[in-house]
Image: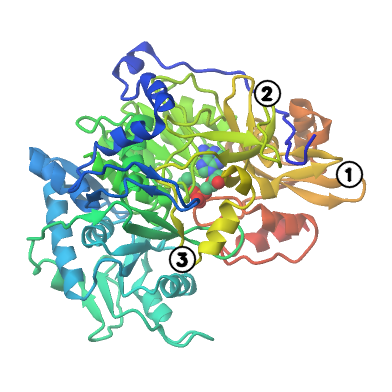
C-alpha cells in the first residue's frame, strides 16, 4: 500500500434517480459525455462558440509550453459585451438581471438594459481616471448591484479586477492592493451586515495610509466610493470620488473593444487555510466559456423561466463564476442578497426564496449545517416549493447534511448537485448532472464532459475503483488558472511539480473512487490522519458524527498519540433541538461508541469535545490546523484568516 492510499470506512448506499419529467426538460443530455470523449478540444470549441467573438478563433488549445495553457488564442472577445450588450441587442434588455435585496429589506430590480447602461458609464469613468487595459483595479464592496457593475466595467475596458472580500481587514486589503499594484480602489462607505453598517471606506483609508513597515501605499491614484451605509467617512480631496457624483454624469455611450482570449480578466487571492495568499490569475475566453457552460448544464439553467440564486459573496471565486460571469453570460435572472442568513431573523434566506420564487439555489455545506443546527422548524415556515435544483460547493457535504438539504429544502424532489472545483479551476470540474446522474449523498461523482481527472497514488498510478488517493486533473481545461500573479515559479511548484513527469495538475485534495468509479472527496491531503498506520480522512469520520441525531456539525483532527502515532480528536456542535431535550453529559461517550459502530474501532475518537462554534475561514471552511493546536495542547497558531478571532479562545476554554 503506498502512502497516499486513504482507507475507506463509511458505506453509503442511498441512490436518487432524477424523475422522468425532470430528465425530459433538462438542459444537459447524456450525449455531451460522448461528444466530449470523442473530441475533447472540438467539444470545448463548440461550447466557446456559444459566446460572441469579435474575432472568431481558429486555434483551440495551445499546450506547447506546459503548464502555461492558451485556449482559443487567436480569438478576440469582450467579456462584458457577452454578459450585457449581447442580450440587449437580442431584444432581451427588459429582462431582470438582478433581483437585489438589501439586508434592511430595501430592494431593487435591475434589468439587463439598466445594468449595461451603468457599466458603460462606469467604464467611461474608469477610463477618465486613467485606467487602461491591463491596469489593476481593487474592488472592496458589499453585495450591491454596483459591485457587479464595477467588475463588468473593468472587464469591458480590459482592466484586471481584484475583488477583495468586504470582511477582510485593512491589512489584508493592503497586502492584496500592493501585490497587484492597483491603480484604483472601488469601495463603499459601508454595507449592512448583521443588522449594522459595517464600514468599508475607513478600512481603505487605513490600508492606503502609513502601515507599520510598509509606509504609505504608492500605486493607488483614486478611490471611487459608493454611498450605501450612510456612515460618516473622511475624504481625501483629489484622490476620492463619490460614485453618485461621477457615474450618472458620465456618458452611457461606450463601445466594447475586443481583447484577445488570453487577456487577463481578474486576479483573485485564495482564502488559504495555509500559507500566504496567492493571486490566482484567470483570463477571458476560456474562463467565460467554462463558467457559462457549467452554469447551464450543472444548475440546469433555463434563463427564460428560472430565478437563480447563488448565495456566495462576489469576494470568492463562486461569486465571480456563478454570480457574475456565468449567469450574466447566460442571460439569467438572479437574486443578489446583501446580508447574512440570519438577519433580522433565522428564516431570512427562506423568506427570500419564497418572495422571489427562487428555482435554483446554490450554496455551501457550512450554511446547510448551520440551518440543521437551528432545526427544520425555521425553513418549514416558508413556501419553498419553487425550488427545483439545489447545489452545494466549498467542502465535502456530509451525507446527512445532503439528506437534510434534500428533505427540508428540496421537498424530496429537487436534485442535488455536489460540485467540486477550486479558485484555481475557475469553474465546476466534478459534479452530477441533474436529469442524468443518479445521485449519491456525499459524492461529487463524475467529471463534467470535457474534463479529465484521476485518483492516483504517490507515483501517479491510477488507484482503481474502491481505493483512495490523490485527486489530479490530467488534461488542461479552458477555465484553468493561467498562473499566480507575479510568481510563475510558485505556480509551477504548487500545482505541477508533484506529477511533473505526467503533466498532471495536483489539486491538494484526497479522494476515493467507489465501485462504480464515482468520486468521493475526502478533504485536504494535509488533514489526513495516520492512526496505527491507517490513513483516515477527516471527511468520513465527520460524516459519521453528523449522522448522529444530536450532531449538526463536526470537525476531526489527528493529534499526536504515544501509542497510535496519531489519535482522532473530534469537536462537535450539537443541534439546538437535541439540547432542549437531553443533557450533553454522556454524549461524548455515546458519540465515541457511535463512530466505532458506524465505521469501526480504528476511527473511534480518543476525545470528543462538545463546542459552541468551530474555527472557520471567512469563506466558511473549517481550519483544522487550529484545532490540532488545541488537541495537542499547544498555543494556537496564526489566526489571521479566521472569520471570528474570538472563537479559538472560547474553544480552548471549553476544552481545558
Ligand atoms: C477547495 C477549493 C470551489 C469554489 C469554492 C471554494 C474544497 C470545494 C468541494 C466539494 C469537496 C470541495 C476542496 C477544494 N471543495 N468544493 N464539492 N466537495 N470539497 O474554492 O476556496 O478555492 O477551495 O474546496 O478542498 O480544493 P476554494
Per the image, label 1 sits on a secondary structure element best described as loop
Query: How far apart in space, not on screen, are marks 2 and 1 (Cα)?
Result: 24 Å
Answer above or below: position of 73 versus 202: above
Q: How are the colours assigned in the image? A: rainbow
Q: Are marks 3 and 1 in contact (CB under 8 Å)?
A: no
Task: Tell me the residue at 29%/18% (across/down).
Answer: 25
Image spot of residue 50 (x, y percent) = 24, 36
- Residue 566 visible in this rendered orientation of the protein: yes
Residue wearing tag 3: 168
The answer to which quarter of the image holds residue 53 is top left
Q: Are marks 2 and 1 in contact (CB under 8 Å)?
A: no
The answer to which quarter of the image holds residue 88 is top left
Q: Which mark is residue 564?
A: 1
Q: Is mark 2 within 8 Å of ligand 1?
A: no
Q: Which mark is residue 11?
A: 2
Answer above or below: position of 634 versus 436: below
Amino acid at each position: 500500500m503506498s502512502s497516499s492510499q486513504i482507507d475507506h470506512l463509511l458505506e453509503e448506499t442511498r441512490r436518487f434517480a432524477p424523475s422522468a419529467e425532470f430528465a425530459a426538460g433538462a438542459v444537459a443530455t447524456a450525449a455531451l459525455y460522448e461528444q466530449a470523449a470523442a473530441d475533447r478540444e472540438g467539444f470545448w470549441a463548440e461550447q466557446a462558440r456559444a459566446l460572441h467573438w469579435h474575432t472568431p478563433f481558429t486555434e483551440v488549445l495551445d499546450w506547447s509550453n506546459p503548464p502555461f495553457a492558451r485556449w482559443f488564442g487567436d480569438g478576440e472577445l469582450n467579456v462584458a459585451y457577452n454578459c450585457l450588450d449581447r442580450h440587449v441587442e437580442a431584444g432581451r434588455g427588459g429582462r431582470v438581471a438582478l433581483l437585489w435585496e438589501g439586508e434592511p429589506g430595501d430592494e431593487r430590480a435591475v434589468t439587463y438594459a439598466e445594468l449595461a447602461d451603468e457599466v458603460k458609464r462606469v467604464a467611461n469613468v474608469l477610463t477618465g481616471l486613467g485606467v487602461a487595459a491591463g491596469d489593476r483595479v481593487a474592488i472592496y464592496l458589499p453585495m450591491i448591484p454596483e459591485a457587479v457593475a464595477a467588475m463588468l466595467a473593468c472587464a469591458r475596458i480590459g482592466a484586471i479586477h481584484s475583488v477583495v472580500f468586504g470582511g477582510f481587514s485593512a491589512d489584508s486589503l493592503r497586502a492584496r492592493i500592493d501585490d497587484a499594484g492597483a491603480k484604483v480602489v472601488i469601495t463603499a462607505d459601508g454595507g449592512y451586515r448583521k443588522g449594522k453598517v459595517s464600514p468599508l471606506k475607513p478600512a481603505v483609508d487605513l490600508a492606503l495610509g502609513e502601515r507599520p513597515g510598509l509606509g504609505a501605499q504608492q500605486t493607488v491614484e483614486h478611490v471611487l466610493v459608493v454611498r450605501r451605509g450612510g456612515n460618516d467617512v473622511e475624504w481625501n480631496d483629489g484622490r476620492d470620488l463619490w460614485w453618485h457624483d461621477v457615474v450618472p454624469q458620465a456618458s452611457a455611450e461606450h463601445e466594447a473593444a475586443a481583447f484577445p482570449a488570453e487577456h487577463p480578466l481578474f486576479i483573485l487571492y485564495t482564502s488559504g487555510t495555509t500559507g500566504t495568499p496567492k493571486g490566482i490569475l484567470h483570463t477571458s475566453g476560456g474562463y467565460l466559456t467554462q463558467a457559462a457552460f457549467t452554469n447551464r448544464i450543472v444548475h440546469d439553467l433555463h434563463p427564460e423561466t428560472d430565478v437563480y440564486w447563488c448565495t456566495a459573496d462576489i469576494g470568492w471565486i463562486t461569486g465571480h463564476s456563478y454570480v457574475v460571469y456565468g449567469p450574466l453570460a447566460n442571460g439569467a435572472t438572479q437574486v443578489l442578497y446583501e446580508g447574512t442568513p440570519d438577519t433580522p431573523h433565522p428564516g431570512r434566506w427562506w423568506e427570500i426564496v419564497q418572495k422571489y420564487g427562487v428555482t435554483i439555489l446554490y450554496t455551501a455545506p457550512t450554511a446547510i449545517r448551520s440551518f440543521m443546527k437551528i432545526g427544520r422548524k425555521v425553513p418549514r415556515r416558508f413556501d419553498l416549493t419553487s425550488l427545483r435544483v439545489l447545489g452545494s460547493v466549498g467542502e465535502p457535504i456530509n451525507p446527512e447534511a445532503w439528506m437534510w438539504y434534500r428533505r427540508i429544502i428540496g421537498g424530496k424532489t429537487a436534485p442535488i448537485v455536489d460540485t467540486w472545483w477550486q479558485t484555481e479551476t475557475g469553474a465546476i470540474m466534478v459534479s452530477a448532472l441533474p436529469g442524468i446522474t443518479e445521485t449519491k449523498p456525499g459524492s461529487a461523482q463524475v467529471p463534467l464532459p470535457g474534463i479529465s481527472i484521476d485518483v492516483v497514488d504517490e507515483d501517479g498510478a491510477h488507484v482503481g475503483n474502491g481505493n483512495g488517493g490523490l485527486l489530479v486533473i490530467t488534461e488542461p481545461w479552458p477555465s484553468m488558472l493561467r498562473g499566480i500573479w507575479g510568481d510563475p515559479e510558485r505556480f509551477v511548484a504548487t500545482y505541477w511539480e508533484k506529477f511533473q513527469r505526467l503533466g498532471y495538475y495536483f489539486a491538494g485534495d484526497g479522494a476515493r473512487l467507489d465501485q462504480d468509479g464515482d468520486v468521493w472527496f475526502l478533504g485536504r491531503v494535509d488533514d489526513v490522519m495516520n492512526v496505527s498506520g491507517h490513513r483516515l480522512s477527516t471527511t468520513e469520520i465527520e460524516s459519521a458524527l453528523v449522522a448522529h441525531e444530536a450532531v449538526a456539525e463536526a470537525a476531526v483532527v489527528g493529534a499526536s498519540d504515544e501509542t497510535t502515532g496519531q489519535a482522532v480528536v473530534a469537536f462537535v456542535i450539537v443541534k439546538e433541538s437535541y439540547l432542549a431535550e437531553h443533557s450533553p453529559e454522556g454524549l461524548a461517550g455515546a458519540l465515541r461508541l457511535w463512530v466505532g459502530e458506524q465505521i469501526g474501532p480504528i476511527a473511534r475518537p480518543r476525545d470528543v469535545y462538545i463546542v459552541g462554534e468551530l474555527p472557520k475561514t471567512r469563506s466558511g471552511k473549517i481550519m483544522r490546523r487550529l484545532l490540532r493546536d488545541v488537541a495537542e495542547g499547544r498555543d494556537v497558531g496564526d489566526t489571521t484568516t479566521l472569520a471570528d478571532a474570538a472563537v479559538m479562545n472560547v474553544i480552548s476554554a471549553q476544552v481545558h
